[in-house]
Image (tube, coloured by chain):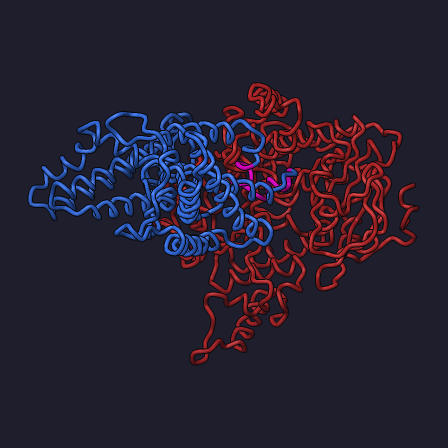
Chain colours: A blue, B red
Amino acid sequence: MFKVKYFEAIRTTAVILIALVIAFIIISLVSDHPVKTIGIFLWEPLSTKGHIGNVIEMSIPLMFTGLAVSLLFRANMFNLGAEGIFYFSGVVTSVLAIHLTTLNGWVHPVVAILAGSIVGALLSAIPGILKAKWNANELVTSLMFNNILFGVGLYLLNYHLRDAKAFANVSFKFEETARLAKIFPGTRIHTGLIIVLLLIVLAHLFLYKTKWGYELRMTGINREFARYSGMKTAKVIILVHLIAGFIAGMGGSVEVLGMYNRFQWTSLPGYGLDGALVAMLAKNNPLSVIVSALFLAYIRIGADMMARLSDVPSEMISIIQAVIILLISAEQFLKFWKNRMLLKEAKASA
Amino acid sequence: MQSALLEMRGITKVYPNGVVANQDVQFSLREGEIHAIAGENGAGKSTLMKIMFGMEEPSDGQILIRGEQVKLQSPQDAIDRGIGMVHQHFMLVPSFTVAENMVLGMEPRKGTSFNYAEAVRLTEETARKYNLAVNARAKVEDLTVGMKQKVEILKALLRGAKILILDEPTAVLTPQETEELFHELQQLKTQGHTIVFISHKLKEVKAICDRITILRGGRSEGVFDMSDVSEQEISRLMVGRDVVLKYDKERLSAGEAVLSVDRLNVQDSLGKALLSDISFAVQAGQIVGIAGVEGNGQTELIHALTGGLSGVLSSGAVQVAGRDILAADILAIRGLGVSYIPEDRMRQGSAGDASIADNLISIRYRSKELNQGPLLNGKKIAKLAAALVEEFKVRCSGPRQPIGMLSGGNMQKVVVARECSTGPQLLIAEQPTRGVDIGAAQFIHQKLLELRGNGCATVLVSADLNEILELSDRLLVMYEGQIVACFEEPSKVSEEELGLYMLGIKRQDNLPTGRAAEHV
């Protein structure tokens, strides 16, 4: 069974390689100096401490949302609401970062982040309850919630948080006490990295080592079986929504306080949907989220560098992502190869 | 040797989950014969037949029809070549009439609209031609199981099938209906059709087939003329040893009533009675069997006993150890020591992608014993799982293997192991050995008897009459949501007599009802 066991890992690697090859082909067609451009795309993100820092900074929100979405997918909930929650929790945290002025150093960000996370959990629970009680499709409700949350958040930004003195549509400045500390000099990597890594380890323990995680996994694999065994699957579904909302909300809060000094998203930042891609690449495994978020951040930063230093625009990255999503979700991809391997193994063991 | 109508050479099929269902299987069909494919479950019968009908592609091997090599990539390919199939679970649209079902996918037209009159005419013509009487205008949902099967056969014939594959055709039939089916099959044979008959009921195979191909563990054990082999020999070839389904059980003195059902009535949301006035009791150390043709209220009764009644109206009382459970949730019911082996091990009984160990602990993962503070005790779980796998002889690579990779029989053993290992007071066993090979079935039977010896009360619902007659201390027969017969010594009842009650032709008078039933 040696080879078959690693089939999924091999398949994921193959998908990534194919996507990269397609990217190279496109670059070759578009660019006047394809070799140089590909070199920029691949090596530039790793070339300096600052660039590596950029990759890690970008991977932090991806880890948050990737983790949140992984847990939802594990429970067989196809919920893409991390997007709206990420955004809205950022708004909530910004309010506290601006208006709470009496708190000292480390308490301020803790309060602001926790508030954002709790709001995220509560908002996320709504599609969860709708699903658990009335079997309302969580994909539909969560996508609609993304729009609602964005609309409300943008309203708050425009009418309550907006700094008229600034030249763009941004909020007032955060209090200095609210911002997260940088942990590596020369980069903008902030304490959010520690928070998210801690969270990932906790989620791993929760999923595989606790009875609640066990309930979540069984409900995800076969809800009928879970119910038959005596599990309260409705509660499990609501619980996983609360947890995922909490994590996604914390992601938005941490991102705002770690990377910015004003709230400035006037469109959905897209990290929630990226989280779905991260979760798919990670096979919904909390620990693998780290690697897949880093990979996604790496090719994003690579594309940014490429846009800056060569003649290929960074939108090229969307093509790579689309190919990855397509191939990963296409279950039949490489099946023939697996079947041939299975046949060989069966014959060998006969 | 006669040339073969259909031949399969060296068929090997490996499923994506690694299960080797067929390995180098040889099969050859002569024109105009009834050919049995027999084997335990998990022997690869269903897979072989799916390959024959183009539903699965073989990983290796050849298929030849009249000496010409063919590739069957879809059922349509098979139909085009004159192969028809009658599935075990009927593929009919219940709300359509017989005629509409018959022409599904090949509807006759009048202009742009569906020509119903022509469909009826086609149906009646086919029915007359093959002497299989059906009412073309009846709705399929109103038909008996035997009738539905007839429609399936006609459907295949209408599509020009010369080779008919029947997958466990008698599994859902009463003895009388089975006889009728055999008569029809003989008739088709004389009209020149070739029939592949898949079954693990040896008596039937012996009664009707000309030749038999025996499968064991995914390989063909050989093909025999029926006159050359006895039932004993076939069964030895199928399982590799002699089997008799006969158990010596001591008569136990009746204990306390563990389960009592008192005047239970259940109606569906439209007010149709599903269960009427059901009363019975099960004492500790007693197995009460419930026989009946499928769909006569057994499912609803089990729902009432296992917390599965929802969205229906019910009255009466169901008590376990004196506690009312009709409105209780599943967790509370299980908390009273109720275990339940469900009919469908894939849909309810297991989580396919989860490990055997995860499947084994699903009803006890909350227990103190398996937890350590907030965490599950992985070591204890592994130990428990390994012990159960060993005790129940589950053939697998280890407790961490996903349960979905096991064969049906082994999967069922895991389900039984889980439900029997918690020391239940009451066990609800619904078709505990359906689709399970004889070896595993015997093993499961022994476990049920062992629990009985330990004072567990058992409700056994089964379509396998042999099983139910042999295991039960008391046997109830259900027909149209009512109990129509009660036998105190089931092993002395013949299958034929049971059949009369199951079909509603006979019913016992003065059956005890209400509270009185508890003292039976």
**In-front residue for pair B205/B345:** B345
- Residue at the image position 92 percent from the left and 52 percent from the top: B510
Q: Residue furthest front?
A: A102
Q: Is residue B296 above or below residue B340?
A: below
- Reply yes or no: does residue A183 show up in magenta: no
Q: Is there any visible trace of residue A246 in the rendered image?
A: yes
Q: Is residue B351 left or right of residue B291?
A: left
Relative image position of residue B151 (x, y in whole percent): 58, 62
Indicate left or right for B427 with A3 as reference: right
Most extreme residue toward the bottom is B111
* Quadrant assignment, res B10: top left
Q: Could you tell me which residue is drawn at 45 percent across and 76 percent down?
A: B109
* Quarter of the figure that contains the C terminus of chain A: top left
Q: Quadrant of residue A43?
A: top left
> Residue A224: within the magenta?
yes
Query: Which quadrant of the figure has residue A47?
Result: top left
Secondary structure, magenta segment, majority class: helix
Query: Which of B189/A319 is in front?
Result: A319
Residue A80 appears in view: no
Quarter in which the N terminus of chain A is drawn? top left
Q: Count the labels in the image.
A: 0
Query: Up-down: is A4 above or below B87?
Result: above
Q: Is residue A34 left or right of residue B401?
A: left
Residue A8 location (% of width, % of height):
37, 34
Q: What percent of the width, then of the height, locates residue A21?
A: 20, 40
The residue closer to the viewer here, B116 or B371, is B371
| Residue range of the region highlighted in magenta in the rendering | A216-229
As rendered, which of A173 and B146 lies closer to the eye? Answer: A173
Picture coordinates of residue A19 (x, y %)? 24, 41
